[in-house]
Amino acid sequence: MAVHLAPDKLGELETAVALVQPGSMVALGGGLSARLPMALVRGLIRAGIGDLHVVGSAHSIDVDLLAAAGAISVCEESYVGYEQDHGLAPAFRRAAQEGSLEARESCCDTILTQLRAAEMGLSFLPVHGVKGTDIERLHPEYSRVTCPFTGHQYVAVPPLAPDAALIHAPIGDRQGNLHIKQPYVLDERFAVASAMTIATVDRIAPTDEVAAAGIVIPYYRVAAVVESPFGAHPSSSYPGYSYDRAHLASWVAAARTHEGAQDYLDRYVTGVDEDGYRRLIGGDRLEHLTGYGASDEAWMELFR
Amino acid sequence: MAVHLAPDKLGELETAVALVQPGSMVALGGGLSARLPMALVRGLIRAGIGDLHVVGSAHSIDVDLLAAAGAISVCEESYVGYEQDHGLAPAFRRAAQEGSLEARESCCDTILTQLRAAEMGLSFLPVHGVKGTDIERLHPEYSRVTCPFTGHQYVAVPPLAPDAALIHAPIGDRQGNLHIKQPYVLDERFAVASAMTIATVDRIAPTDEVAAAGIVIPYYRVAAVVESPFGAHPSSSYPGYSYDRAHLASWVAAARTHEGAQDYLDRYVTGVDEDGYRRLIGGDRLEHLTGYGASDEAWMELFR
Amino acid sequence: MSYRAGLDELFVVELARTIRDAEVVFHGFGSPCATVAMHHAKRTHAPHALLIEGATYAVNPSPAFIAPSSNDHSLKRGSAYSMRFEEAFDMSVRGDMDLMFLSGIQIDPHGNTNVTAVGAMPNPKVKLGGGGGGCNMSATIGRLTLWTTNHRSGRCLVEECDFITDIGHRTPEGTRSELGYPGGGPDVLVTEMGVFDYPEGRARLRRLFPDVTLEEVTAATGFEFAVAPDLAPVQTPSRDQIDLVRAIDPLGVRRREFRPAELERSFSL
Amino acid sequence: MSYRAGLDELFVVELARTIRDAEVVFHGFGSPCATVAMHHAKRTHAPHALLIEGATYAVNPSPAFIAPSSNDHSLKRGSAYSMRFEEAFDMSVRGDMDLMFLSGIQIDPHGNTNVTAVGAMPNPKVKLGGGGGGCNMSATIGRLTLWTTNHRSGRCLVEECDFITDIGHRTPEGTRSELGYPGGGPDVLVTEMGVFDYPEGRARLRRLFPDVTLEEVTAATGFEFAVAPDLAPVQTPSRDQIDLVRAIDPLGVRRREFRPAELERSFSL
């Protein structure tokens, strides 16, 4: 939660991911099919930074890829998967079942509450539910607290202050001011509760442009910013591009086996840098994903 | 905290203020010289709705006028006055000193925390300070709570859920969607924590225009909306108009005596409706306050 | 003259019927049937409902189609305002949401649901996706409409969940009121076979889809259940209602919740 | 060649000196001297400071003038981002703010301040404005710069506050650490007569304005205080520094904090 006041934080992906220490707690921005910090995830895998405690709400291929790379020790998310479209996350699921990662599953609202405790500088906060569910058993770090006014007993949760928040934004400036579109998911909370935010942006823009669009995460929360076009691919980064449903399907199919997942990692992650990644996906395909705005029909066709 | 789903809530000021019951807890939007809900305050005074428990952060003529009218029983604000410019609030001060209102002074952060407790549906929240100060003595409703993790003892505060939030916005639509500019002060929190929001707007606008400007308070929090041009006068309602420093000075001078304050109320509040109020202030004067944007020099001249 | 509707279409209309007008309704993610149902209700009997659109948290949008991912921006179309994440969750936990849709890979007779794991944690047989916000929200939201499209498998409606992710009417630790939970808990459970309610906090069969028998339901259900005295077939929707389902969801995303055999079921209207 | 500066100008430069570079600095409302000092520091020795502008909560603005009300929009000019109220307060209470300016109608030797009432609440002799956010913020912010322009009256620096609104180094209930407060408390007190520090949690005179004597300070101060062995005059600002004060605050809003007699004091540079 320190502030980051340097006037220019623009740098390379390799330098940015090196700010993440092995064994640290990492918050993943975005969620499901939107604004996942994929370039940073790929960068972490390339750099071999592992033993991570990842936290977040509902996520998909970001966690799944890190799990496939063996980079996660604890997964404290509320959901990992591809909804009804592609179902369970194969690599995450395999790692959880084998016990090579600890699935310390949580609830969106509990994580929100723990981040708020960190933001508010409080050593605990109460949550409404959890009591009586098996989620409580996965979290020996929770406790109970009794309201001094009503006598009601709540589950008490400790603050969650990640070492780093990884966030992708469509635009940001060199100082680290970031504009994102709703849903912000937990990104605002992550940026405040974490010791630092590491950001990728599709495009570096002048401060005036970012301010006119609306600064959602201010520069003093951001330790490093990297220009990474299509850095959220295969998730979306509106208003730039939609998510790549076919690519997600191909990953899920490949990842059904350990070998398939490793082949994908070799090909799309460790075998290339981000320039190479974009070439592999192909300019035509990426261009196609930017065409969602032409008409409702064009947008719908992306998902057919 | 009920939702308000009627499609058209546009109505008259008299009808809107009648939603406030005598004896109820009323949150005052805006703060200091900005976006005070003055038309609603004047409306309450005209309607003789009193015995109010007002809550808010740092306020000025809104509380002062209500105090002059004898409409406040409990004042739970963090500050009432005119900063270094015009100093203490004469009518509020007189009422507090005489004991005709209870100055249950609070702290901005405590009020924020209590509103958050209401928003989060929690029966208590801890605050950081207060312990060891005399503010705690003014609030027998506070308690203490011990953190189950650290053993630290915090002051615990109960939720604050006002019966009505009075908010002025530059624009809003008929359904009650409101756009305001930063500083939002506590208006977002008031709108959620209160049973209903009663709004005045300088101008009713189409929903598209309000959405493009940015809806800060959504329609389902708002029970009634009234079109009241210059409804924040003598405070500001940017981007429409700046605050009227000379008018504030004349009120403060008048209110140094009980009689002066009553003369002001007779002339500017109970003797007129809002149309009459604007005529008394004068079209030229109001027009002058809208001219702040012509140049830095023009803006500065308003305060010379 | 012949007009046939699919089970998926009847199913979402049945879900839509659990929404009342002028309510606050939410579903979260991974629930295309609930998404379609919400828009269906809003365009028919619940025009004043406040819809919170999936994981976009957009208020009252009118999307041109339902996207296969519930936080795609296409789902925000026409919405003037989107809630922040925290606004939506605060609203639910303080009890300002009237209805949430919730599904489960396992559902017990009390309406507890498991979306965490089949088999014992920490190294389960099948690690499922997880519960999103349900663990807290199920404690406080006005009432829950549960649904599953996997009743017939015999593995969904079970005597005991392997893991309780979201809270129903009672868990081994106590009833909702003993646990201090203000929400009303599960009100209705819609499956691809029929509809249950919870008159005493325990599932009771209330309706059957027209092509399903009580015996089939009994065979597929892992717990004993009461049968309502007025057990009857699900009310058949009108053709307009079915047309509306198709108009709301031209991609047929709702169909991805069903096994192929269920999608072959059709009904003459 | 003659160049004279007013006491108000020396005063805000002295306040500005308590700001270090690359710090997070806040003052709140009703404090034009602190406002001017913040902008002065930002444009001189603290270019990387993160300034939070009064009650606008705008980050690093460069206003064309200082308005007489601290939440006027003119104070936001040039700021790309404004904090929400809750962001600013959270930042302070979790200890992410380095420095806050705080004034008091009464200030005791421990640096407790009273801005609530002179005389006993609930029906005091004088009901003052109130403390804004100070009651919580003074507990957690890195350090506080206190100031008053009313030292000479003899009524401000008192042995005991009639009411403790904001916390200093100890109250009758205990020291900061006994109370569990993480912030460092008052670091400096600047008055129109001189400058105090708090080496052991108690005010000690460190500097005198050039036209003030130790005897005058002693006469005006309602508590006993130590005197630093290196007691010296306040360092005179440069002409450029004074010009900058005038450029930042062309309306002279800072002067509204001072009694007329103090404004007549001037210093040759």
Image: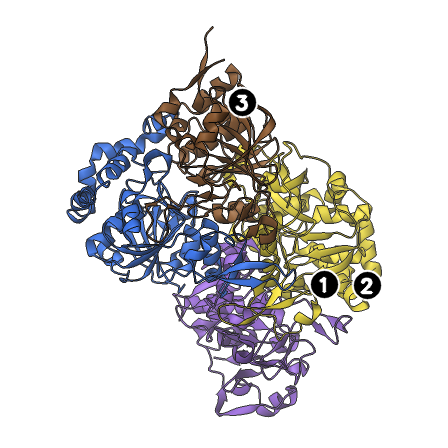
Chain colours: A yellow, B blue, C purple, D brown
Mark 2 or 1, closer to the camera: 2
Q: Are marks 2 and 1 in contact (CB under 8 Å)?
A: no
- Quick check: can you spot residue B255? yes
The residue at which mark 1 appears reads as: A89
Quadrant in which the N terminus of chain C appears: bottom left
From this view, report whether residue C202 is shown above or below residue C104.
below
The residue at which mark 2 appears reads as: A100
Cα–Cα gap, marks 1 and 3: 68 Å
Residue B172 point in image, percent of width and height? 35, 49
Mark 1 or 3, closer to the camera: 3
From this view, report whether residue D22 is shown above or below residue A51.
above
For numbered disc 2, what is the local secondary structure? loop
Cα–Cα gap, marks 2 and 1: 15 Å
Q: Residue at x 47, y 72 (%)?
A: C142
Q: Residue furthest bottom?
A: C229
Dot 2 amino acid type: Ser
